[in-house]
Amino acid sequence: MRVTTLSPTDAVDRALDRIAADGRDGIWIALIERDTALDAARVVERRLAAGEHLPLAGSTLAVKNNIDVVGLPTTAGCPAFAHDPGTTAPVVAALVDAGAVVIGVTNMDQFATGLVGTRSPYGICPNAHQPGLVSGGSSSGSAVAVAAGHVDLALGTDTAGSGRIPAAANGIVGLKPTRGWLSTRGTVPACASLDCVAVFASDVDTAARATAIAGGRAPDPADPWSRPRPVSGDCRDRRWRIGVPDIDSLTFDGDHAARAAFAAAIAAITRLDADVVPIDVSSLIDCGRMLYDGAFVAERYSAVGRFVDDHPGDVDPVVGRIISASSRHTAADLFDDLERLEGFRRRADRMWSADGGIDMVAVPSAPRIPTIAEVLAEPIAVNSMLGTYTNFVNLLDQCALAAPVALGGSSPSLSPHVTFVGRAWDDAALVDVARRLGPA
């Protein structure tokens, strides 16, 4: 676990100095003024001096720009949509109350519609480590801000994989908690019934600690999608049963290096004090196709479709086509898909059950990480490929943690990246396994 040794004011200075030294466009949309951020850090120092326990003191925080932060406009990646929020989103406020200092708001695929990090009028978000590759989306700037060392923590959102694909593209941890644990009040929705707030960090323990703080114990009474978190016991160091698919059944979109990396990750998993169980994930992948190919995409129109229709010149063309076209679905289409989804849920339930005998599933975080040029040439097809192992998770009410797997001292940015998927409220189990597999 990362140990904070800097004072809050020194941490703020370091963050802003690193951002200035980096100099790359497309990561941040707006920064807090240095004096304002330092004032916030001094408040943390005074609270510490008064004896308060602040577990995130000395930590700096980036926030995806579809999550409200008072003092900065919420744009959702669209300048014409910008508005000044009257209050800060509860998830941000909880981290600030624990001692974190917000540094700024980050770039994103517009209206959280994309897994690529290229669909923004604020510029294409660069990959933190590998120029020419996508940074992943839609929480691109938040992931890169952590991976590039600008900040310690970042918040994103995740509907189709936006808290996991950017983590994979940049070699960090992305924790997509159980839907409804972290309040989504104060976020611009993509698909409100499926949306989650996600947490990025450089290590598993930091991500888990921040998630627990952001989620708290009680549901948010002002968020209709919030729900109570069951009390669970300590599950650390248990012997888990991990479902692993046959590598020959998976697609890596022709990338032999990605295939070899996942094979190495599977080998690392088998060396854990865990039982590895062969499973078939084809029904999960089939379920994931429903997110964009079925009627569920119409919820994006419910969120921002009227704005998109009224402001065609202000919207990214790819985003505009996806959202406007989603209005074609009927209520009958949705009910048909809800029934079909129940069939997929039954299959998933059998997979978790005593007969199936697994606690979690390990899948590649993505088939491969494509180049920016590939995405610009084929924006829909490449984006769909990226969501192969992510799209089903929120549909099936599952939690997920995407993390690099440590192999022989390789840097996290170049390590194989694996996503662990579990049942709702099994977040702690995923944390335990990913902690044991991650870089020390």
Image: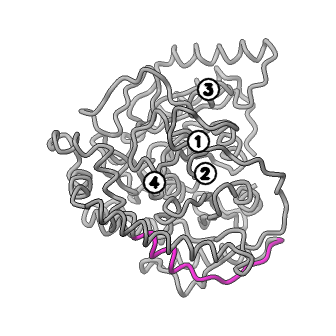
**In the picture shown, does residue 17 fall above or below 407?**
above
Kindly identify the residue that appears in the image at 14 percent across and 42 percent down: 313
Q: Which mark is residue 96?
A: 3
- What residue is disc 4 on? 159
Residue 172 image offset from top left, x and y in percent: 59, 53
255, 380: nearer the viewer? 380
The residue at which mark 1 appears reads as 182
Front position among marks 1 and 3: 1
- Could you tell which of marks 1 and 2 lies nearer the N-terminus? 2
Q: Secondary structure at mark 1?
A: loop
| Distance in Å between CA atoms under marks 1 and 2 | 8 Å
The part of the image, by quadrant, that contains residue 48 is: top right
Report which residue position mark 2 lands on. Answer: 177
Give the secondary structure at mark 2.
Answer: loop
The C terminus - image quarter: bottom right
Relative to 423, 54 lies left or right: right
Residue type at mark 3: give it: Val
Give the magenta part as a residue range.
273-289
Q: Are marks 1 and 4 in contact (CB under 8 Å)?
A: no
> Front-most of 245 and 49?
245
Q: Could you tell which of marks 1 and 3 lies nearer the N-terminus?
A: 3
- Queried whether the magenta region covers residue 285, the answer comes back as yes
